[in-house]
Structure formats: structure tokens, C-alpha cells
Image (cartoon, rainbow, N blue to C red):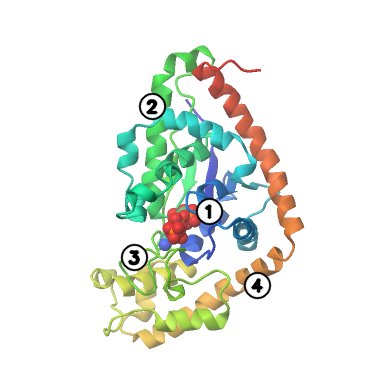
Amino acid sequence: MAFKERVFSGVQPTGNLHLGNYLGAITKFVALQDQYDCIYCVVDMHAITVWQDPAELMHATREVTAAYLACGIDPTKHIVFNQSQVAGHAELAWICNCVARLGWLNRMTQFKEKVGKDRENVSVGLYDYPALMAADILVYRATHVPVGEDQKQHVELTRDIATKFNNDFGASIAAHGYGDAFFPLPEPLIQGPATRVMSLRDGAKKMSKSDPSDYSRINLTDDADAIAQKVRKAKTDPEPLPSEEKGLETRPEADNLVGIYAALNNTSKATVLGEFGGAQFSTFKSALVDLSVAKLGPIGAEMKKLVKDPVYIDGILADGSERANAIAAETMKAVKDIVGFVRR
Ligand code: AQP
């Protein structure tokens, strides 16, 4: 069955939006606007799977919205909203819970990495995060999901849930006139030289909002001085840059910085090495500072301006939520019929 092409993705309002979120996700969101109908969500229900201070959660929700706008997402042509304003996410998550198998969730590496040895004390919500993410995508019957590499497994789980729903309820789906499949199998869109941006302090660790060291990441709201300091202090090795990509294979920190440069400059690692091969890190880092400040400076400034106007931001989220809800409510009506829930 052919599905209408639609993009869905989201970012958690958990503070410290960073270069990884920007290069791995938000730049992709912006680029896809020309080709698809896009729905971009601030996933505040995902955020509370770990404790969030309520006032900070509200601020962070507005800040992620400001980042979307400052990076160039058009909320009039597309949909920008926060998850908790559309009840369909939670409603469909329950159905996804009942379709997903425990063994599938037990395999999720992000959960294992996040909880470490503290498994008994984390929230049930954190464990169930991927089922809610499946609902986020499926409630819009989205076909494409731009994400960083770390979310690939969750999109694959979404495909498994969609497949099992389509199979389990196949007869009911056909009887209600939806053909042989109600949910599309969404494609993860993970491309380019910075799908997994690493910590500036440790080339083996993902750049992350929750890293205790602020020097591990470049935040979207960092000013030019902070960006320069962080790039200059970024861990490297004593060798000059190689001229070929192969030379980066055993040098994770160098590989990361070259990938960041390439992504910010919209080019490939090979092109960057063509220019900087043989150069010392001091030369390359100066160029990276200039490029980062040129690209991120205007975004940070616009974000700071936008968050000063919460009424404007809340208006964008309210309008987006209304339009998102119209789509989600249609899906939920159909899902209830398919599952066999009596409804008004
Ligand atoms: N380091 C990264 N490189 C590339 N993409 C990344 N993303 C996150 N980190 C990187 C992508 O950004 C989008 C939004 O992420 P999120 O906020 O929903 O969740 P996250 O992956 O848990 O982000 P963090 O920063 O890593 O938070 P913590 O510290 O809580 O673990 C997603 O598409 C993600 O792939």
C-alpha cells in the first residue's frame, strides 16, 4: 500500500542543546522541509523519563522550539509543537506497549547504556521510552524519520511494532477499508559526516546533554569565546592531520573534529582532508573555531532573542499542536476501530 510521505522527528527539552543535536538532527530537519510535509516535536513526555525540574522543563521546551525556529524550520508551512499537547501520543503508546514484546525492549542498547548498574531505580518510563517513540512516529503514520545514529535502533523497533500491528490486526485493517497495512514502516534518515558527533573530551563517547563536563560539547547558545575555548581544549593527538580518510581510522578525536568541520561546511571529510592534510591541529582548530562561530553564532543569538518572548513561542506551539492533533485524532479513530474499542 502507498502511504503519503511525511517526516516526523523530535528533540528532548532536557537542556544544553548541542552541536550533536544540531548536526545529527536539526540541520536534517531543516533540509527536508523542501521535499516533505514535516512534523517536528519537542518531546517533553520523553524528557520526564528522568527527573526534570518543572520550571526548567518549561524553559527548555521553549528553548528547543526557539532552536527549531532559529535554525530555519518554518512553523507555518510545517508543524512545530510539544508532545504533551497532543493526547494521541500517550494513547497510541499504550497500544504500542501491548504490541511490543518484552524481549524487544530488553535489547535496546540506549537503555542499557543510560542505566548502567542502576536498573532497579530508574523509571518504568525510561525503559518504555522506545514504545512512546514508536507511537510518536506512528500516530502521524510518518514515513521518514531523520535522527542521529544513536536513535537507529529505536526506529527499527518502531518498524517491528508497525509490522506486528499490521499482521496481528490484518483482517480488521482490511475489513475497515485500510488495505493490507495500516501503518507504514518508517525509514530512518541517517546520512552525512556527523551522524554521531563525539565528546570533545573523549572520542569514544557521544556528545551528550547530560555529560557533566561542559567542555565535552558545544552548546547552541555558547558565545564565540566559549566556542573558541572548547575547540582549542578539544582532545587531539600529536600527529598532523592525514591526507586521506583512512588515516583517521585509529584516531577518533581527529576523526570527530574533521567530521564536525565537514558537516558545518556542508562538505565531505575527504574534501576537508584535501585542504588540511599535513596541517598541525593548531591551524585546523583555528579554522574550526572560525567556521563554528560563523555558523552557530547567529543561531545562538536568535535563540536568545526568541526565548525572551514566551508568548510568541507558546503561540507557535499551540497552533502546531492543534494541527498535529487533527492528524493524530484521525489515526486514533482508525486504530480504535481496528483494535475493537467501542467509541463515540
Ligand atoms: N552526539 C550526537 N551526534 C549526532 N546526533 C545526536 N543526537 C543526539 N546526540 C547526538 C540526535 O539529536 C536528536 C535529539 O536527541 P534527544 O535530545 O532526543 O536525545 P538524546 O539522543 O538522548 O540526546 P543527548 O544529548 O545524548 O541526551 P542525553 O545526554 O540525555 O543522552 C536525536 O535525533 C539524536 O539522535
Q: Label 1: which residue?
A: 11
Q: Where residue 315 is drawn, which disc sits there? A: none
Query: Residue at horizontal 64%, vertical 39%?
Result: 324
| 40 or 187, nearer to the observer | 40
Calculate the distance from the C-alpha at mark 1 to the C-alpha at mark 3: 20 Å
Kind of residue at disc 3 = Lys
Is the residue marked by circle 3 packed among few (<14), some (14-19), or many (20+) residues within 10 Å? some
Callout 3: CB less than 8 Å from ligand 1: no
Residue topped by disc 2: 164
Q: Residue at x 37, y 55 (%)?
A: 114
Q: What label sits on residue 301 in the rendered view?
A: 4
Find residue 246 and report its horizontal and vertical position in percent: 25, 69
Image side of residue 192 versus residue 322, left or right: left
| Residue on which disc 3 sits | 205
Residue 286 location, quadrant: bottom left
From the top left corner, tell me how far across and down residue 189 is, in percent.
44, 48
- Closer to the N terminus: mark 3 or mark 2? 2
Task: Check the image and report above or below for 232 versus 319.
Answer: below
Q: In which quadrant of the rendered image does the C terminus lie?
A: top right
Residue at image location 37% in from the left, 63% down from the top: 206
Whether residue 314 sits left or right of residue 42 in the image: it is right
Amino acid type indicated by mark 4: Ala
Task: Tell me how far mark 1 sits from mark 2, CA to CA.
Answer: 27 Å
In this orientation, which residue lies closer to the viewer: 79 or 91?
91
